[in-house]
């Protein structure tokens, strides 16, 4: 009962949020100076051509009517046609989505592993120099955003010690047998480890740049809640039973300490996905974010709209899942 | 135990001084840029393109940190770039702070429909990827220093609004607020005279952090070539150029990057240091 109410309430607020996003995107883009129709036509087009195309896109109607036309299209999955490529926006955007999803998920996994290990190690060695060093590293990692970490990584592992590729998603000369755009997963499924290695070598640095700030947040919060848990009676009991420190941390304390971190990881994951926009640009990685920046530079309005709305759907979707997961895991909320 | 805590405190003090020192140096360099910079930051000389920094073979005296592909002096461009970075940090940070904190204060203390509207707006704002949002706004507003500042304000007010709202809510529930009302102070008066002073430390900390964020946003926008006129020296623009020629001339990327890195680190460490000093809530 409680869970269902949480679900319905969250679905309702999510719908309101997305509607707000749609309104803002539509009107912000309508303020753009310059006539998008003029940009779609070759030079030398007549006034009649312009009028015809304007009517076709409904741009001669009052703005609220344009909004209704556009929104009903969006709700049916019709995001219009990209001005630069003349292809349906939905297809273009969905074609790039897998690249961005793979990058974000790889970064999330790296962040959880790095942050988790830092927290566990710091808890085990609490009060020593090791913990101090971990705190300082966390502080540094947190203070500097992904964009700068990306540049530092390019210098370190792209130029100084060139071990990873610094641009692209895969070596262009390779023959790709893929039928989906999930290169990372598909290369694994097809057991093409040569391709997989090449793809990972391209993704490693952008993913690491995205992961570093999140890893620091996870490390800090998890260590803090682990240390608090270590003082609880049941942990002391486990210790008096003769279990070692590592066992106590991993088997007893971790289970109780992980919940606050989980909620935070959810929120931070959306920030990480937002970070892909500039990181993809930095590493010339062919994902949604890179496409978005090109779309803005080319004034490709329908494409910009499509990408921003897709990002908003992903953001609110992740938040929704996290909230529900939290409600499901937290007995206090479940029975409320 | 006591000794350990003292050590932590001393380290925190050092952190505060180092950050403030670096930022103070930057301010001086920015203000006196025309007198400090050894060369004209815009002067091109294709015969002096991609000169290495002074300690590398082939360096030219007078170009301490080398030149970029157009023969412009890297050090002078970094010095003049500090002007733009700090101007954006100061103006964008302050305006964002005032607007965001006001909205947060109203939402958190007045509650009711004011809170409802502002909270919903925050939710909607949080659904936009910030970098994409800022690039979109610049595309709409056209490039320029003013556009960057507007974009930062429009996007980042939620950072202040969220935190200040939560804190104003917590403060509003305290006894001293009720006493102020009993004494006969009105709602708006209580908000200004009682709540605001108590939330102020938090706001100052957030402002410091926001200045660091503004510097980064400006650099990111210059990096994607949407900041100000491409000729003007900005750290992000230099980094963008350095990124394309990183194998031929690493110094064009490294020096502006190090400067940006230290500046962002300094703002954030200053904010964290201030937080530890006088803000029990954020800590």
Image: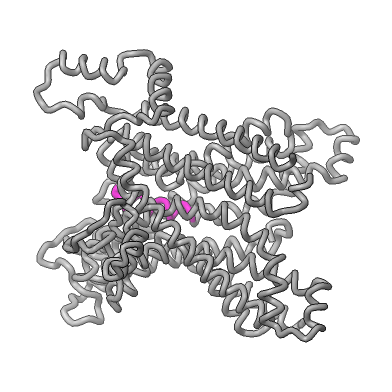
Is residue B266 in sight in this rendering?
A: no
A299 left or right of A7 in image: left
For residue B119, above or below residue A143:
above
- Specify the segment rendered in magenta: B213-225
Picture quadrant where residue A53 is located:
top left
How many discs appear? 0
Is residue B200 in sight in this rendering?
A: yes
Q: Nearer the viewer, residue A201 or A271?
A: A201
Quarter of the image with the C terminus of chain A is top right
Q: Tell whether position B54 is magenta.
A: no
Q: Please name the colour scheme applied to the rendered image.
A: one colour
For residue B50, above or below residue A127:
above
A317 left or right of B205 in image: left
A254 left or right of A285 in image: right
Picture quadrant where residue B196 is located:
top right
At a point 60% along the width and 53% down the height, the residue shown is B206
Could you say where residue B181 lies in the image, as x and y percent from the top left?
86, 35
Q: Nearer the viewer, residue B277 or B172?
A: B172
Q: Tell whether position B214 is magenta.
A: yes
Could you say where residue B9 lies in the image, as x and y percent from the top left?
68, 75
Could you say where residue B44 lies in the image, as x and y percent from the top left?
16, 59
Prevailing secondary structure of the magenta residues: helix
Residue lying farthest to the front in this orientation: A190
At a point 63% along the width and 47% down the height, the residue shown is A323
Could you say where residue A133 lies in the image, as x and y percent from the top left?
57, 79
At a point 47% along the width and 28% down the height, the residue shown is A23
Quarter of the image with the N terminus of chain A is top right
For residue A47, above or below residue B75:
above
B187 left or right of B67 in image: right
């Amino acid at each position: 009962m409680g869970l269902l109410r949480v679900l319905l309430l969250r679905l309702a607020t999510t719908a309101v949020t997305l509607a707000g996003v749609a309104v803002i995107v539509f009107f912000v883009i309508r303020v753009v100076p310059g006539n998008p129709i003029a940009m779609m036509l070759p030079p030398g087009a007549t006034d009649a051509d312009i009028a015809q195309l304007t009517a076709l896109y409904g741009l001669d109607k009052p703005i609220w009517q344009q909004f209704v036309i556009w929104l009903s299209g969006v709700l049916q999955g019709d995001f219009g046609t990209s001005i630069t490529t003349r292809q349906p926006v939905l297809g273009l955007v969905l074609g790039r989505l897998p690249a961005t999803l793979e990058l974000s998920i790889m970064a999330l996994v790296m962040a959880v592993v790095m942050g988790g290990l830092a927290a566990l190690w710091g808890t085990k060695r609490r009060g020593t120099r090791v913990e101090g060093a971990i705190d300082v590293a966390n502080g540094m990692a947190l203070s500097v955003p992904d964009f700068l970490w990306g540049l530092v990584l390019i210098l370190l592992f792209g130029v100084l010690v060139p071990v990873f590729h610094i641009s692209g998603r895969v070596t262009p000369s390779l023959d790709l047998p893929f039928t989906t755009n999930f290169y990372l997963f598909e290369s694994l499924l097809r057991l093409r480890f040569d391709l997989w290695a090449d793809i990972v070598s391209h993704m490693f640095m952008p993913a690491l740049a995205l992961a570093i700030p999140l890893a620091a947040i996870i490390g800090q919060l998890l260590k803090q809640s682990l240390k608090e848990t270590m003082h609880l009676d049941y942990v002391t009991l486990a210790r008096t039973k003769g279990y070692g420190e590592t066992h106590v941390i991993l088997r007893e304390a971790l289970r109780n300490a992980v919940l606050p971190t989980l909620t935070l990881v959810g929120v931070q994951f959306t920030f990480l996905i937002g970070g892909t926009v500039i990181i993809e640009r930095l590493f010339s990685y062919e994902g949604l974010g890179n496409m978005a920046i090109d779309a803005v530079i080319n004034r490709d309005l329908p494409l910009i709209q499509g990408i921003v709305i897709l990002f908003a759907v992903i953001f609110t979707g992740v938040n929704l899942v996290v909230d529900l997961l939290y409600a499901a895991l937290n007995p206090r909320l479940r029975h409320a | 135990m006591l000794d350990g805590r003292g050590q932590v405190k001393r380290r925190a003090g050092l952190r505060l001084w180092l950050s403030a020192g670096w930022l103070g140096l930057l301010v001086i360099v920015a203000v006196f840029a025309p007198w400090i910079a050894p060369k004209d930051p815009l002067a091109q000389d294709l015969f002096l393109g991609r000169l290495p920094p002074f300690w590398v073979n082939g360096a030219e005296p007078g170009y301490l940190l080398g030149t970029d592909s157009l023969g412009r002096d890297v050090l002078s461009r970094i010095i003049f770039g500090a002007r733009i970075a700090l101007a954006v940090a100061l103006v964008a940070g302050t305006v964002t702070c005032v607007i965001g904190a006001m909205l947060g204060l109203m939402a958190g203390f007045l509650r009711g429909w004011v809170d409802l509207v502002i909270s919903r707006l925050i939710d909607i704002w949080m659904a936009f990827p910030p970098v994409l949002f800022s690039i979109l706004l610049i595309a709409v507003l056209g490039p320029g220093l003013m556009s960057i500042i507007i974009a930062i304000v429009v996007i980042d007010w939620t950072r202040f609004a969220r935190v200040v709202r939560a804190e104003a809510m917590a403060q509003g529930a305290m006894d001293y607020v009720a006493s102020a009302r009993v004494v006969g102070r009105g709602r708006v008066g209580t908000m200004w005279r009682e709540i605001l002073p108590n939330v102020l430390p938090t706001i100052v900390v957030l402002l410091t952090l926001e200045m660091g964020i503004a510097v980064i946003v400006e650099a990111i926008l210059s990096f994607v070539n949407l900041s100000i006129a491409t000729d003007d020296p900005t750290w992000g623009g230099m980094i963008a150029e350095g990124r394309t020629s990183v194998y031929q001339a690493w110094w064009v990327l490294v020096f502006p990057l190090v400067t940006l890195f230290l500046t962002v680190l300094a703002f954030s460490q200053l904010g964290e240091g201030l937080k530890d000093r006088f803000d029990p809530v954020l800590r």
